[in-house]
Amino acid sequence: MPDTVDIPDALIAALANARCVVIVTGAGTSAESGIPTFRDAMDGLWENHDPHQLASIEGFLSDPALVTRWYDERRVKVQRCKPNSAHHALTAMERHVEAQGRRFGLFTQNVDGLHQRAGSRRVHELHGSICTWKCTHTGRTMPVRGEAFPQYPPRSASGGIWRPAVVWFGEMLPTEPLQAAEKMLRSCDLFFSVGTSAQVYPAAALADYALQIGAPVAEINLHDTPLSARADWSLRARAGAVLPSLVAAAFGQDDSTI
Ligand code: OAD
């Protein structure tokens, strides 16, 4: 996959002048941090499992020990990973856009917390967080850090089970990020889709909405997606290679410092 992809001048100019930048990221943004994506053939997270067994309320209810173990093992792995140059470039982009009094919103499907660890502040987690767990009885949430739980499923003091506060198939998304996205998209004049197969709704609907209101849409993704043919720009390259160059070109910062 080429790393030195040509970034269209029109996209650079659009970013340099945008008044409201909205970004959706997916698992491909964290791939260069060593976190497997969901659907990539080689090392997809679901390569050895049926996703509906692992990422669904039915799967949890039928085998809470398997599901909580699988998520907790992912959490421990994720905590050892570090933000990559794509995350840092998006943090720099937020800083530059806001320094000029403009608006920036990052809506991630990822649950790994790497955007926040890279310093991004305007992050909305569409699918929750693997580092926050909630009690099935009380709904109380708690941050979970460090080593794995000693047993599965982890029991809460109220007699319930601690489960990851992530969105499973068949569950509703949290309202906050969707409301924030809907509000920002009304003024969006540049939309990015980064490292996502653009297949899972309602997250994938954000790009559809941007297209409907006539906002220019840029996709940065290794493979073709259902969005690719409709986007104004669709760059087949690693997010960790393109984003630092794009931010440097738009804001005149040396991309080695990103
Ligand atoms: P996918 O695994 O479906 O798609 C990841 C995309 O990232 C693929 O299209 C890859 O081509 C691309 N990719 C991989 N490495 C990349 C890189 N270095 N730079 C740029 N692109 C790269 O993951 P998502 O689209 O995030 O939902 O999946 C969406 C949702 O499906 C997930 O949030 C999850 C799953 O159901 C829940 O868990 C609720």
Image (cartoon, rainbow, N blue to C red):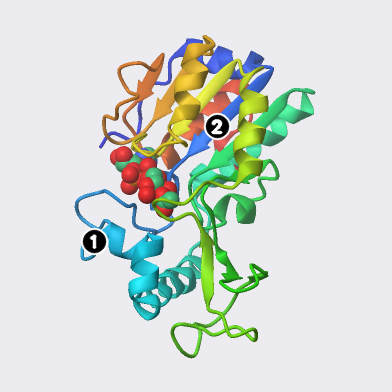
Q: Tell which circle, 2 or 1, labels the residue nearer the N-terminal end.
A: 2
Asked if residue 252 can be seen in this view, the reply is: no
Asked if residue 83 can be seen in this view, the reply is: yes
- The residue furthest bottom is 150
Q: Is residue 145 above or below residue 202?
A: below
Q: What number of labels is visible?
A: 2
Q: Is residue 242 above or below residue 187?
A: below
Q: Which mark is residue 23?
A: 2
**Closer to the camera: disc 2 or disc 1?**
1
Tell me residue 53's x, y (percent). 29, 64
Tell me residue 194's x, y (percent). 44, 35
Amino acid at circle 1 = Asp
Mark 1 closeness class: few <14, some 14–19, many ≥20 residues within 10 Å? few
Residue at image position (51%, 55%) is 111
Tell me residue 243's x, y (percent). 49, 34
Residue at image position (39%, 52%) is 169
Relative to 211, 178 lies left or right: right
The one nearer the camera, 236 or 4, is 236
Q: Is residue 84 above or below residue 133?
A: above
Q: Which mark is residue 50?
A: 1
Kindly state the secondary structure of the residue where label 1 is placed.
loop
Relative to 123, 52 lies left or right: left
Residue at image position (60%, 15%) is 189
The CB of the residue at mark 1 lies under 8 Å from ligand 1 = no
